Image (cartoon, rainbow, N blue to C red):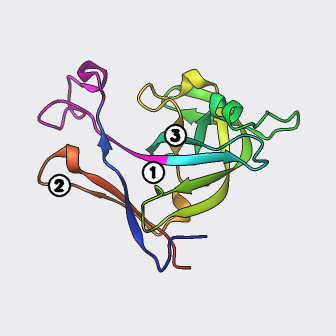
Amino acid sequence: MGGGEGGGFRVSRLWDAPEFNQAQRNRKPFQSTSDGRLYRPYVDIRIGGRSRLRPPRWCRVQVDCGADCCVLAERIADDIGIAKPADAHEERLRTCAGLVIAWFAEVELHLGMPNDPYQFDWTAHVGFVRDEVLPVAFPAGILGIGGGLERFLSTVLIPSPDGPEATAVRIFTPPA
């Protein structure tokens, strides 16, 4: 498992809302781009249940270095065959949506598309929350620090002179 000798790979571009009004902010400090949009970094990640009763699912999740843990929608748990156990560990999380209750389960995560030279697989405990508490822009979930970004040496946002359409997120894997 791992991405080789500390190799990096391009994961994604910064996301902009398909609906201009969905991401537009009319006041400072949010309106910092010339088009008024608020860009958010994301990655496409494959999520699977440890039992492998159902196939894994590719999801687009927001990269959030301010989130203490990875949080996914409960519908993702349903899709990959994870049922909430009666004795599931639950936590109250403070989010922009207010206090939410998350239950935790172990999943298999994968970064890297089939044609990428570097791919990375790992298992992590992630929180599952009611679908409606996640951001409209990223209804599948958030890749936070615990269980996610803590597995990597660095996450780098690389701006491009061509504008936000060409900006990349690079995640560097630990040395093998």
Residue 127: x and y in percent read 66, 40
Residue 136 pos. (x, y %): 44, 25
34 is within the stretch colored magenta? yes
- Location of the N terminus by quadrant is bottom right
Q: Which residue is mark 3?
A: 59
Is residue 146 among the parts visible in the rendering?
no
Q: Earlier in the sequence, mark 3 or mark 2?
A: 3
Amino acid on which disc 2 is placed: Ser
Look at the picture and state if 33 lies above or below 123. above
Instruction: Assign the C terminus to one quadrant of the image.
Output: bottom right
Please name the residue shown 27% across and 34% down the image.
38
Vertical placement of 64 versus 1: above or below?
A: above
Which range is magenta?
17-44
152 with respect to 37 (left or right): right
Residue identifier under label 2: 160
Would you say residue 142 sits in the magenta stretch?
A: no
Callout 3 environment at 10 Å: few (<14), some (14 to 19), or many (20+)? some
At mark 1, the secondary structure is loop
